[in-house]
Image: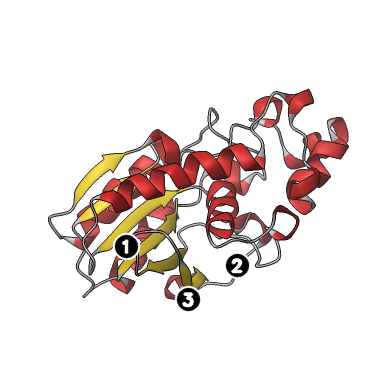
Amino acid sequence: MTKLYFIRHGKTEWNLESRYQGMHGDSPLLPQSYDEIKLLAKSLKGIPFSRLYASPIKRARITAFELVADLKQPIRVSLMNELAEFNLGKMEGMLFSEVEQQYPVEFDAFRNHPDQYDPTAIGAESFPALIQRFNHGIHEILQTAADDENILVVSHGAALNAALNGIVGVPLAHLRDRGGLSNTSTTVLETKNHGQDFKIISWNQTDYLHKEKDLTDTI
């Protein structure tokens, strides 16, 4: 049985501002995010990890290396383009409110109706394309995984939400039913057959952060 521990990166300035980051946009982690990564590491204490795979985008990359340093385990870190956030095209760098005003159809579909999301007008990535890309990366990771291995994966909220629901067979129309993923959250999936089937063990765990969430924490 292989367990994959999926981590959403720490909260950033643009998260706080309710601004889309996407694949090409980025902003620094907030100062408190470094403390929250330490709390995340404390929650994982006692679980042996040998490998961590991360999106190469700076906010995820920094989260990954901070987590490894706090875990104090000899963990090999690999960066994978397949784990990057959605390419959000023209929405990247824009406030949610600005996108809602300028691209109301795309905004509503992206947030509420993934099966109706057509990114053509904004030059962005579709849900099926993201799920295929991300899950190709997951299966590549599992090709060399041991049966009893625990593996860390650090990525992004929208990409993780879509891909993890997709990998367990949730239809596009229902990708949002389980709820979003919060900054510095942990979601655990396990597979007993090297990725032919997956089971969700926990979703969006954040109790170790000891705080009340606000609307800017979760996407």
The residue sitting at 87% across, 35% down in the picture is 101
**Residue 189 locus on image (x, y percent):** 43, 67
Cα distance between the residues tagged 2 and 1: 18 Å
Tag 3: residue type? Asp
Cα distance between the residues tagged 2 and 3: 10 Å
The residue sitting at 48% across, 74% down in the picture is 202
- The residue labelled by disc 1 is 38
Q: Can residue 149 be seen from the camera position used here? A: yes
Report the front residue among 138 and 179. Answer: 138
Tag 2: residue type? Lys
**Residue 18 locus on image (x, y percent):** 67, 45
Q: Image quadrant for the N terminus?
A: bottom left
Q: What element carries label 2?
A: loop
Q: In which quarter of the image is residue 169?
A: bottom right
Q: How crowded is mark 1: few (under 14 residues within 10 Å), some or many (20 or more)?
A: some
**Residue 27 locus on image (x, y percent):** 50, 35
Residue 207 image label:
3
**Mark sitting earlier along the chain (2/3):** 3
- The residue labelled by disc 2 is 213
The residue sitting at 63% across, 60% down in the picture is 180
